[in-house]
Structures are given as structure tokens and as C-alpha cells.
Amino acid sequence: MNTGQYQLSFLAGLLASFCLGIVGSAWQHLSLSSHLLYFIFFLTAAALASGVLLLRADPRTWIAFAGLFFILGAFRFSAVYELPAHDISRLSGQDAVVAGILTDAPRVSTGADGVRRIRYTAEIQTATVGREIHTVSGKIFIYMRLPDDVPVGQIGDKIKAAGKLRRPHGYQNPGQIDTAFLMRTQGVTATLSVREGAADIASEESPTIIQKAFRYAEAIRSHYLNRMDAVMPHTDAAAIFAMLFGGYEGIRPELLEAFTTTGIVHILSVSGSHITLLAAVTAWIALCLRLPRWGTAAMVICTITAYVILAGLVPPAVRSGIMGAVAFLGIILGRERDAQHLLLLTGLIMLLISPLLFFHISFQLSFLATAGLLFLSPVLHERMARLPRMLAGSLSITIGAQLATLPVLAWYFNQLSLSSLLANLIVVPVVELIIILGLAGGILAFFLPIFGSIIFACDSLLLGMAFELTRGIAALPFAKIWLPTMDIFSMICYYAVLGWMIMPQRYRETGINICCAQRKLLGILVCVVLLSIFIWRAVRPDEMAVHFIDVGQGDCTLVVTPHGHAMLFDTGGTRDAGFDIGGRVDIPYLLHNGIRAVDYIFLTHAHEDHAAGAGPILSYMPVRQVYTAAEGTAAYARSMRLGDANPLLGKLTRAEAGESFTIDNVCVDVLYAPPLDEADNATGNEVCNVYRVRYGNASFLLTGDLVREHEAKMLSHQGNLTTTVVKIPHHGSDTSSSEEFIAATSPLYAVCCVGADNAFGHPRPAVLKRYEQRGAQILRTDRDGAIIFRTDGTHLRVSTYAAEKFLGN
């Protein structure tokens, strides 16, 4: 290999090796403290080998460098992921008084109950537990209600608050965006909810220059929002503010849904499209001023930098700024190939600094979309030479970005917007005009408030037009299509095909010649692979899968029969309607697992943490029938938040004890269905159905919130209750799981569906101990995340999200 050859391939190889090192370290959970000597040895050996081979100009030098960056990736991930001994998260679970400095502008929101709440982000310096003062480090989120007479505070102010420290915890399911991990990428390792009163805020009179800059940027953002609120509805102001600076607070759900369906939801957060728009307007101004190319480039960089600072230097804005600037500058300077080099180098540097970004959806989409723009779009544009220039340009850019991000979209969202091209051609220009006018209106409002108000009023009208256009496009047939989730092997094959597409012609011809020369060997290899797949599918036994989904403090179990039929047992939900479990946890989980219709939903009782999620599921996808307990349709309508006259309620039927349902040899038995006795129904848990799912010799007992008294009644009416897996009744409460019940069921596994750090103290240690003493293995959704059992009726396998967190299913 001659020095300087194949630079692009070399950089791509280094980036790929570094990423593989990150994945390997995450997969094996390598600890820096435990493996430090090994890291030092292998890094030194790989560096020496790379240096020697480089000096000799050896053709194998790239192998040594690939190995070096693989080890470096593993080392960097281990170093960043392992928390130091003095991190604030080490005190999680304890009541503490923390003191620190505000690092971000406070976020104020109004909940569905009309209560104003605030979230602070603070770098913590000390934490007092009892009488002991700990010197700590790390960022936390501090949550509290916002009284009217309490100062909000600003960046750089000192904060002191008392409450219980907790580690961040999201919904741990495959395909779900891991909010706790996203917080970790921002350096946030703990949360604290203020118990009573408010946090003490002490104004910092001598802020640093950086803090002054952040304060000024926050003041500008507040100026924009206040001016817009004065002349338009708050929902419009929130949407336009999101288009300008990012964020989803206060946006109408209908607008968010329409933008998501048409594939332009990125407009509502700071993304590469914002950066490209600003760069294009800046370049046009520079062209009017007849600046040279280097002057235009400098002007573009300054504009992007100022905008990213104004957006609060939040990580998505920084990443979008870097990626967008790289792509646009390469195009404007006519150096697309240099931009390709710069993109790979930028991605490598960003991951070197923060390897956790590799698992961050914002980085994944920003990097892949920019790569699609720089690598795929030119190839596609060349192949669309017969189309009109404008159409070819729009098509190549849209398709290039979507092809590059397709596996990520399939993993997280399971949908592809076929209407995105139409939305990009019709709606996006209107939205871009809203953004430009919005930025200009805020500037004018500083000097000529009346003109700024007029521009903002026009912006509100344009937003209404954009919403109607988007809603109309979203309503078109096939506006979006379902995408199956790709596994790791499928993703590798997919990107290999894309790599073949963008490969220079001479390399493709060389590859084709090699394939032709070895066609006999390739033919034999293909036949062997196809035959192996056929034999594997032929001898593989039919399996039923039972998924205990993490829905927080609630129950939700998905049963998938050997031929793909789906049944849900409870659906989770929240009592205060603060979070849509059905729409934001259940439905994404179903789609991620290829479920697009549900045969039956079996609800144990009407409490929201068991039944509320059924409403969104019924509204979103086909459901044949819903079986309920004895509370009556009105109770379930309230829990599901459906109107009393909603036709979906016609699908509800009361389940009767003794009924059985069979699909694909999977049998569901209604073991217990007590009648409604108002005198005996003190908590609502007394009217709780119990279901048993059987497949071959494997059985699963799904108990809802069954209480001790009704455990006894069920035992008196039933014969053999021995089961393979039991869902621990009532989230492990001491109101359930009597000794007699555990002895009668004698489970191999006991699954506890429970929310992390819940206010009820579930599960009770004494309850778990009773199961363990009977030989049951305990699994918990708050620790293990989604728990998946697979059985052919004889053998049983179990996997958990926590064990496969970084590699998916």
C-alpha cells in the first residue's frame, strides 16, 4: 500500500473499527478498573505494531490500525461508562440535601392537571445524608412543583434542594428509546424530587463569561416566546418556538402526529435541516454581498455557531451544527469528497470524546442522514439525470437520507413515510419560511416591536396552513408503511448493499470479475446457505413467546402464538394520565415485534395501571375482542379514557370463569372471575380475573392484583394450579402471595411487574423471600426490563432486556 492511497476507505475502516470496539465493550460489560492493565498492554502493542508497519510502508498497516482503533473504542467506552466512586448516583435511594450550580436553563411545564412544574439541571458539589456531608460530582435533574412566588433561577445560580435521590429509569424494552441512557450521555446520573416546599435558589452575582453567554441566549429565547405568546395562541407559539430552537413542550398532539406521519417531525427540533437552511440563507446573503468562497464559508460558520449557542448548546444542536456545517461547506466549496473525509473524521472525533453517542438516536440519525446526503445523494442524482433538475435534486436528497437511516427508523419507529417526498416538496418550504420569518421577527421585535408582532402574526397564519397541508398529506392512502425490525445481521447486509451502490465503478467491476472467476464456489456457497436455512426452518419447533413488558408500575403481558397471533393480558397505564403508556410504550413494542393486529385483550380488572393502555391500542390497531372483569363497561371506559358512547366499547365482553380460548394450540383458561360485590370491593382489586396460558407442558399464571382472600377462594375452587411461570400478584404487595398460594402454584419462575423506586414500596422483601424459599427464580421488570420466555411446550428459554441492552433482540 502506498502512503496516501484509499484515504476515504482507511478513515471509514478506522471509524468502523472504533464503533465495533464500543459495541464489544458494551456487550461484554468491560470494566476499566478491572481490565486496565489489559487495555494498556493491548493499546501499547497495537500502537507499536501500527508505527512499525507504517515506517516500513507495509501493505498490512491498515490491519494494525484497525486493531488499534478497535481496542481504543473498547477502552474509551469502558472509561466513560464506568462511574467514579464520588459520583452522586452512588447515593441513590437515600434522602439527601444536595447543593450545586445550575448548568442549564430551568424547564417549566404545565401538566394535564394544570399544575406548573419545573426541572433544574445542576452540577452537584455536595450531598448531605443525615449528618454526613459528601463531596460528590455529576449532574442531576431536580423536579418540583413551581409556586407562584418562587424565583425560577438562571444558569450559574446556586441551588440547594432536599429529597430522595434516584437513578434515572425509563421503560426498558427493545426498540424503546432508552431515556435513562440518553440522560447519561448528557452527564445526568441521578434525579431528585423535592419533597416539600421549594428549592433554595441563590443568585450568582459574578457569573463566568460562559455563564453570561448562556444567560444571554436564554434571555433571547424567552424574548421570542413571550413576543409570540402576545400575538398568537400558545400552542402556535410553542410549535414555532420548537421550529426555531427545539423542544416539544406545549405542541398540539395532532400537529405532532401529522408531522411524524409525513416524516418531517425533525422540523420540530434543532436538526440538520435547520442548519442547512440557515447556511443557505447566509450563503445567499454572502452572494449578494459578492464575498469570495472563503468569505462565504467563514460567514456560514459564524452563523451556525451563533445559532447553536442561541439554541442553548444542547447536544442535538451541537451535533446537527457540526454535521450540517460539514455537509454544506463541502457542497458550497465544491469539495464534496473533502466533505466526505471531514464527516468521517468528525464522527470519529465526536465518538472519541463521547463514545456513548454511538447509542444515541440523535447522533445516529444526524450522522447517517448527513452520510446519505454526501455519499448516496450524488449517486442517486446521477442516475436521475433524465428527470427535471429540481425534482431530481429533491428526490436524491430525500431518498439518500431515508436509505441511510432506514435501519434506525425501523428499529425505533417501525415505519417509513412514503409521503415525506410530497411533504418535503409542499410543506417544508412553508415551514422554512416560518423559521426565517420567525428569526427575523424576533430580531425586529427588539427594535420595532410592532413590526415584530406583525411578522409573528403572519407566522401563526402560515403555521395553520402548514398544519392543514400536513394533515391532508398524512391522510392520503399509504402515507406511511410499516417497517419490520432489522436484526444485527440484516443491518450489516443492508449497509453492505448501500456500500456496493456508492463504490466507485472500477472497484465494482473488480468485484464482479472476482465473482465471475469464482462463480462455481459462490454457487455452492449460496446453495449451502439456502439449504441450511431451509433445514433450520423445517426442524425448528413451533414456539410460543410470552413477553412481560416493562410499563413501569403496572402489568402488561404479550403472548405470541407459534404462527404470530397476539394476545395481551393487561396493558399498563398511569392513574394521572401524565404519560400515554398505550401509545408510547405498548404500541411501539407491538410494532417492534411485528404485531400489527391483536386477537384478544384480556383485562384482569379496571384499574388504570392494568387497563388504561387498552384505549390507545384499540384506537390504533385492529383488536378482535376485549375480555374484562365484572366492574362494567363504564368503569373500563373511564380507565381507557374513552367516551361512554365510543363504538370501540362494543368490543368489550365480560369473561366468565371456566371459559377457554385456543389459538395455534395455545390455550387461555379463565381460572377465576369473581362477581362484583360492592360490599367486598374495598380497593377494586377484589374484582380481579386470573388467566392461565398453556402450551404443551408450559404454563403461565397471570394474576393481576389478586388479593389473599381471593387467592384462598380460587384455591378452594381449582384443582391443580402448578405452573411454570407465575406473575406475582399485585406487584409483590404484602396483600397477596400467601404461603398457600405459592405452595399450590410451585412456580419455576416468578415475574414481578413493578416500577422502579415506586411510592408503594413494591415488591416487599418478605414476599420475594417466600418465592425464593420455594425455589422460584425471581425476575423483575424494574431491574431486568422486558422479560421474554420462549417455549416449544417442552423446553423453556428466558431472556431479558437488561442482559441484551446494547445488542437488541
Image (cartoon, grey):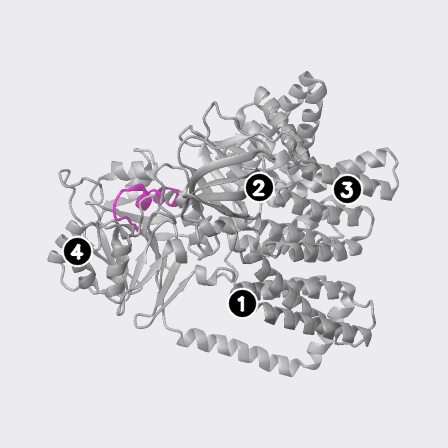
Residue at numbered disc 1: 34
**Circle 2: residue type:** Val
Give the mark nearest the N terminus, 3 or 4: 3
Residue 767 in percent (x, y) is at 25, 56
The one nearer the camera, 227 or 369, is 227
In the displayed structure, would residue 514 be above or below residue 167? below
Q: Disc 2 to disc 3, how far (Cα)? A: 25 Å
Front: mark 2 or 1: 1
**Circle 3: residue type:** Ile
The one nearer the camera, 131 or 167, is 131
Q: Which mark is residue 658?
A: 4
SS at mark 2 in the image = helix
Q: Which residues are magenta?
A: 601-617
The one nearer the camera, 544 or 472, is 544
Q: Disc 4 to disc 1, how far (Cα)? A: 56 Å
Residue at numbered disc 2: 265
Judge the density around disc 4: few (<14), some (14-19), many (≥20) Cα neighbours within 10 Å: few
Residue 203 in percent (x, y) is at 58, 29
> Who's the residue at 41% across and 75% down the image?
538
SS at mark 3 in the image = helix
Front: mark 3 or 4: 3
Q: Are marks 4 and 2 in contact (CB under 8 Å)?
A: no
Judge the density around disc 3: few (<14), some (14-19), many (≥20) Cα neighbours within 10 Å: some
Give the mark nearest the N terminus, 3 or 1: 1
